[in-house]
């Protein structure tokens, strides 16, 4: 049996599929035990971001007094050279790419360059893999036009694959932030009413909430840095709302902006916002619980009912076979 026949044998393909499913199941069950929260690394990156904001502030101050600036954030590497040589940032321009990457936790110019590079390379890679398999290994009896359509579909999927990847990471990050946000507001309310400043209160909450959500701890630490070094505090709150892209966080940011602008009590606004975010979290959990029976219908039909029928009807079938065997 040749290698091609071995690879295209249905039994081998089924065995490989089952092995992949079992491996994915084991990884899914074992990942919570092996996962490291990485909070120290995240907080270190936030500290680096704070130093970068400090350097930018010094550069702006130096330029304001006529001195030449020295800060130049460079992004060197293969991805940067390819993007600049082919002008991919103009060819594949996406005005929201910076916000999407920030929502997924990627900040700075390097992730933008990497995104454009893989958005350019991924379609050709996917199309080449599909074409090599259909034209060289197994065509599944497809017509030439069907093979061409499959290659075009792989090309389109490769173009949207980076966006899908970033969207999934941003969604998981948003869920982690939203789950711990009401508790962080309660802690922030306690710190503010005890007499702490807003920056000190946010920094204290970021250090306490890290065990529950390291993503929220990172965002709050970055908010503290931006409150210290950005020219307008309003811009720091708006950046937090844009990075999280959640209505609850946006409403809190708006409330804090209005409290600082008009001098309204921040404690009362935080108490109301904490209650609203807790209700949003509860409604989201109720929505998931309501949709659970519909989602369990297909798994029950495919996995539970056949086993149940075997357990119930198996002994009866065996007894009937024994009766007919005696006669």
Image: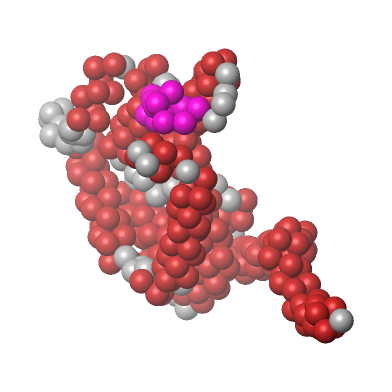
Can you say which quadrant of the picture contains the N terminus? top left
Q: Quadrant of the C terminus?
A: bottom right
Majority secondary structure of the magenta segment?
A: helix
Q: How far from the left and from the top, in percent, is residue 260?
A: 51, 54
Q: How far from the left and from the top, in percent, is residue 210?
A: 40, 70
**Is 113 a magenta residue?**
no
The answer to whether residue 61 is left or right of residue 16 is left
The residue drawn where x is 48% and y is 55% is: 15
Residue at horizontal 24%, vertical 42%? 57
Q: Position of residue 178 (x, y in %)?
A: 56, 61
Find the magenta span and give its range. 122-139
Q: Is residue 115 left or right of residue 50?
A: right
Q: Quadrant of residue 2?
A: top left
Tell me, yes or no, if residue 256 can be seen here.
Answer: no
Q: Nearer the viewer, residue 303 or 295?
A: 303
Q: Who's the residue at 73% across and 58% down the image?
A: 298
- Up-down: is 224 above or below 204? above
Q: Is residue 14 above or below residue 3?
A: below
For this view, does 66 lie left or right of residue 247?
left
Residue 135 lies in magenta, yes or no? Answer: yes
- Quarter of the image for residue 313 reads bottom right
Picture coordinates of residue 325, whole percent (x, y): 80, 80
x 31%, y 60%: residue: 42
Q: Nearer the viewer, residue 273 or 208?
A: 208
Horizontal side of 65 relative to 268 (left or right) equals: left
Task: Decide if residue 32 is in sight here.
Answer: yes
Taking depth in this image into account, of 263 and 84 the one nearest to the observer is 84
Q: Quadrant of residue 320?
A: bottom right
């Amino acid at each position: 049996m040749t290698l091609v026949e071995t690879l295209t044998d249905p039994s081998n393909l089924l065995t490989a599929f089952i092995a992949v499913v079992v491996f994915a199941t084991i990884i899914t069950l074992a990942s919570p035990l092996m996962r490291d929260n990485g909070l120290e690394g995240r907080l270190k990156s936030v500290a680096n971001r704070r130093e970068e904001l400090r350097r930018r502030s010094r550069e702006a101050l130096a330029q304001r007094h006529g001195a030449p600036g020295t800060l130049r954030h460079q992004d060197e590497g293969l991805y940067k050279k390819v993007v600049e040589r082919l002008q991919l940032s103009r060819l594949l321009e996406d005005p929201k790419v910076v916000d999407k990457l920030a929502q997924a936790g990627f900040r700075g110019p390097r992730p933008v360059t990497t995104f454009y590079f893989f958005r350019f390379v991924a379609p050709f890679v996917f199309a080449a893999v599909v074409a090599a398999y259909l034209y060289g290994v197994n065509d599944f009896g497809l017509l030439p036009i069907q093979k061409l359509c499959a290659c075009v579909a792989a090309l389109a999927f490769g173009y949207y694959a980076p966006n899908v990847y970033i969207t999934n990471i941003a969604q998981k990050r948003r869920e982690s932030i939203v789950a711990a946000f009401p508790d962080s507001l309660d802690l922030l309310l306690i710190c503010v009413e005890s007499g702490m400043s807003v920056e000190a209160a946010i920094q204290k909450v970021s250090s306490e909430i890290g065990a529950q959500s390291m993503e929220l701890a990172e965002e709050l630490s970055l908010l503290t840095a931006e409150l210290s070094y950005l020219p307008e505090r309003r811009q720091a709150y708006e950046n937090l709302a844009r990075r999280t892209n959640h209505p609850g966080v946006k409403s809190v940011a708006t409330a804090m902006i209005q409290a600082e602008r008009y001098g309204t009590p921040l404690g009362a606004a935080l108490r109301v916002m904490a209650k609203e975010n807790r209700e949003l979290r509860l409604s989201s959990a109720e929505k998931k619980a309501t949709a659970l029976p519909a989602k369990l219908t297909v798994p029950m039909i495919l996995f539970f009912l056949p086993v149940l029928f075997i357990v119930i009807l198996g002994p009866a079938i065996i007894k009937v076979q024994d009766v007919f065997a005696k006669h």
